[in-house]
């Protein structure tokens, strides 16, 4: 039942006062923490609410036999044979766990997000981190991109198969609406642009494939294990998830509108921004995935123009002509 350093400091002193029959209460003990001179260099100021949570922690998590004496206006131990044993968790570790759970709630589908949330709730029940007095964790807002719904009957067995390195039997609906039955080795799980994907070896296609979990109809682990392929795992990145082809020496011209956006929403983490006299800019990227380059450029409509390499400029032009043809009214 771990706690952080500051709470451990308070709990030890609370227990000491209880053992000494000094009848501490929330008001008096909080004042003592605020006004005391401590030699550890830490600020132990806290509220009455914090001490109330500490008392509850001692009672529920450490089974302390604590009662309140109305006449003496303080807490006491009903018997002194109780022993206080307490491992410790750092405040930073607790904060990381809480923040991680908040993010996970918006990334993982049910029932995984509930399991993560419950695990952190249990930690908070067993701890009294000081940052809860200063920050309202509920005001930390995560707004994820559009997410594809995933059936728990798909995600849970696929997640377990990924953990255990098990081959799965998958019923899969392709983008062409074809349904196939296939054996699949989930070497890597990736959450990308609001969608969960599994990258691994497909026995039907006899090649590496990236499958969207939202397109999986059924997933049944076979109990047959496979050896994780580090090459597949290393390729499960934003750059090489869908297409391993890398384009070098990319130059894209952005207008003044897009020039402002690429500062906060970069095309690539290693991009170089070269300002232009008209308020626009050029993006220079030494190497990036073809898939990312094409999809990003097309999404910017007319605000971005590929300057080099010429082959990618022609490729985007071909796609644009195809789009234009399909959107031209028929005579």
Image (spheres, rainbow, N blue to C red):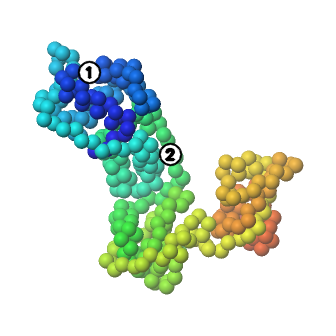
Residue 101 is left or right of residue 234, and the answer is: left
Q: Say the numbered circle drawn on residue 142.
A: 2
Q: In which quarter of the image is the C terminus?
A: bottom right
| Residue 65, visible in the rendered structure | yes
Mark 2 residue element: loop
Which residue was labeled with disc 1?
Answer: 25
- The CA span between labels 1 and 2 is 39 Å
Residue 196 is left or right of residue 128, and the answer is: right
Q: At 49% across and 83% down in the image, what residue appears?
A: 205
Q: At 80% across and 54% down in the image, what residue appears?
A: 274
Q: At 35% across and 67% down in the image, what residue appears?
A: 160
Residue placed most toward the observer, 197 or 93: 93
Q: At 51% across and 71% down in the image, what residue appears?
A: 233
| Residue 179, visible in the rendered structure | no
Q: Is residue 204 positioned above or below 286 on the image?
A: below
Q: Is residue 110 positioned above or below 15 on the image?
A: below
Whole-percent x, y for residue 78 in the image: 12, 28
């Amino acid at each position: 039942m771990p706690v952080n350093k500051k709470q451990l400091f308070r709990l030890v002193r609370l227990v000491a006062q209880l053992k000494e029959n000094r009848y501490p209460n929330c008001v008096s003990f909080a004042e003592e923490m605020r006004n005391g001179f401590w030699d550890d260099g830490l600020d132990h100021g806290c509220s009455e609410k914090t001490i109330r949570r500490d008392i509850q922690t001692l009672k529920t998590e450490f089974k302390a036999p604590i009662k309140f004496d109305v006449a003496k206006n303080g807490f006491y131990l009903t018997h002194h044979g109780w022993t206080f044993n307490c491992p410790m968790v750092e405040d930073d570790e607790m904060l990381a766990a809480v923040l991680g759970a908040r993010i996970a709630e918006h990334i993982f589908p049910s029932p995984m997000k509930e399991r993560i949330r419950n695990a952190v709730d249990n930690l908070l029940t067993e701890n009294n981190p000081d940052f809860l007095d200063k920050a309202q964790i509920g005001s930390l807002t995560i707004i994820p991109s559009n997410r594809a719904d995933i059936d728990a009957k798909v995600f849970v067995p696929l997640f377990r198969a990924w953990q255990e390195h098990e081959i799965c039997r998958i019923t899969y609906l392709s983008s062409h609406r074809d349904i196939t039955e296939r054996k699949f080795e989930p070497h890597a799980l990736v959450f990308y642009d609001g969608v969960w994907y599994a990258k691994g070896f497909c026995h039907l296609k006899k090649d590496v494939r990236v499958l969207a979990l939202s397109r999986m109809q059924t997933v049944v682990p076979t109990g047959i294990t496979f050896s994780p392929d580090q090459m597949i795992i290393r390729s499960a990145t934003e750059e090489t998830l869908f297409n391993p082809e890398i384009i070098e020496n990319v130059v894209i011209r952005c207008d003044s509108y897009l020039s402002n956006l690429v500062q906060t929403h970069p095309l690539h983490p290693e991009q170089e921004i070269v300002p232009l006299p008209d308020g626009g800019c050029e993006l220079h990227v030494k190497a990036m995935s073809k898939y990312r380059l094409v999809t990003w450029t097309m999404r910017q409509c007319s605000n971005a123009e590929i300057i080099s390499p010429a082959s990618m400029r022609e490729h985007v032009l071909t796609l644009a002509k195809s789009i234009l043809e399909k959107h031209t009214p028929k005579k």
